[in-house]
Amino acid sequence: MRIRRSFLILIALPLIGGIVFGAYVLRWLSVLLLSVITLAYLFGEELRIAYPSMHRKEVVERRDEVERVTKIIEKAKESPVSRSILEEQIIEIYMTLSDNQAETYRKLHEEPNEAILLIRKEGNFLENLEKALNVVEVDIDEGGRG
């Protein structure tokens, strides 16, 4: 920690004042001034705090929905977590089609329909996903039977 000459000059007057002044109040004021200068130096100069600028823009690259779902489908071939995410996506489709979304959500978790059973089925995941999406498409065409 290298002490700068400007800091030494700044603290010299209150330090000398704290020693030389005869009045008790003046000594305490000098000590308080010395404390404030030291704190300002430590927090402002020594720690080199990076103050956020107001004009800085944070750019976050986001994937669109198609890229996100494609990545989930690729991972779902081996990952049960990704399969459950796809299952929730299918449930959201049925919830969107229904009038009572909470009831549809509860019902599909308690008694899964054909599309959800196909997603959960063992075997070739991509074929099962395609069959499940065909079932969802038929349900959408019929008006959403859940």
Image (spheres, grey):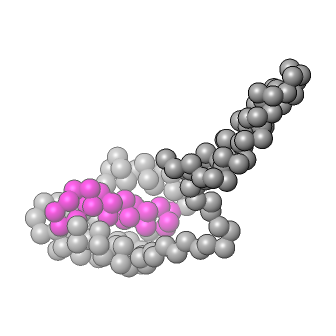
Residue, far front: 20
Taking depth in this image into account, of 55 and 23 the one nearest to the observer is 23
x 29%, y 72%: residue: 71
Answer whether residue 114 is visible to the viewer in this image: no
Tell me if 41 is positioned left or right of 110 in this view: right
In the picture, measured across the screen, residue 118 lies left or right of residue 26, that is left
| Residue located farthest toward the top when viewing the structure as drawn | 24
Say whether residue 108 is visible: yes
**Place of residue 55 in the rendered image (x, y in percent of width and height, measured from the top left):** 66, 73
Residue under the image location 71 percent in, 48 percent down: 9
Q: State yes or no: residue 87 in magenta.
A: yes
State the residue at coordinates (45%, 55%): 104
Residue 10 lies, in percent from the top left, at: 73, 47
Question: Residue 96, relative to residue 27: is it above or below?
Answer: below
In this view of the protein, which residue sits in the foreground, 62 or 22? 22
Quarter occupied by residue 139: bottom left
Provide the residue span drawn in magenta.
76-98
Query: Magenta segment, principal secondary structure?
Result: helix
The x and y percentages for residue 88 are 37, 59
Q: Viewed as shown, does residue 64 lie left or right of 50?
A: left
Q: Residue furthest left?
A: 123
114 left or right of 54? Answer: left
Q: Residue at x 65, y 67 (%)?
A: 53
Asked if residue 108 lies in the magenta stretch, the reply is no
Quarter of image, res 29: top right
Q: Quadrant of the C terminus?
A: bottom left
Count of numbered circles on the image: 0
In the image, residue 89 sits, relative to residue 10, either above or below, namely below
Choose between 83 and 75: the one closer to the eye: 75
Whether 22 is drawn above or below 40: the answer is above
* Image coordinates for residue 8, horizontal then vertical, percent: 66, 46
